[in-house]
Image (tube, grey):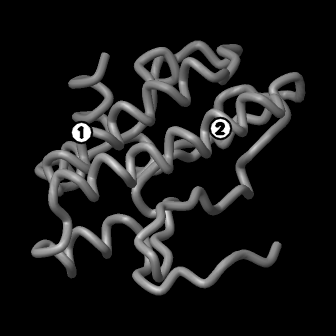
Amino acid sequence: LVSEWAEYGNLREYYTNYKDRFDIRLKLRMSLDIARGLNFLRAVEIVHHDIRAENILITLHETAKLANFKCSRSLFAATLKQSQNLERVRYCAPELLESAHNFKYDHKCEVYSFGILLWEIAEERTPYEQYKDIVKIVDLVR
């Protein structure tokens, strides 16, 4: 997959390295860019499966673009929950963190992940950054 060059890296790198430029207007504009990208994916019945700051790239014109589609699936394909790691679990919907292995990932899970991403954009820090243990984060979210 070939994509546009991301001059500023990912969203987390951007807000860490360019704090002076990341004002409320830019936060809102980037949030809208991400929402539009997710809306497009919903229109073509695709779920991204990995919405988080590391998967949002920032272009030369400070436009936010969705990236890393390796976990993406058609909404109607097998979209059962996938294995979790520390970075992904920070953005997971509570129902995905339950022990039920047959829960189907859908757009509602994407909306939850987007909400956590909005929280990160507003606060300019990683969600649950003080916790390095997946079990602790899961307990907090559930």
Residue 3 % position (x, y): 72, 75
Specify whether 128 is left or right of 52: left
Residue 15 % position (x, y): 23, 68
Q: Secondary structure at mark 2?
A: loop
| Mark 1: few/some/many CA within 10 Å (<14, 14-19, 20+) | some
Quarter of the image where one finds residue 75: top right
Judge by depth and name the residue closer to the eye, 92 or 119.
119
Three-letter residue code for mark 1 = Trp
In what quadrant of the picture does the C terminus appear? top left
Give the residue at x 66% y 78%: 4
Q: CA distance from mark 1 to mark 2?
A: 23 Å
Q: Check the image and report above or below for 67 versus 129.
A: below
Give the residue at x 18% y 45%: 122
Residue 119 % position (x, y): 24, 39
Specify whether 116 is left or right of 100: left
Q: Are the two marked residues, 1 and 2, in contact with CB atoms closer than 8 angstroms? A: no
Q: Which residue bears the numbered disc 1?
A: 119
In what quadrant of the picture does the N terminus appear? bottom right
Specify whether 35 is left or right of 68: left
Three-letter residue code for mark 2 = Gln
| Mark 2: few/some/many CA within 10 Å (<14, 14-19, 20+) | few
Q: Secondary structure at mark 1?
A: helix
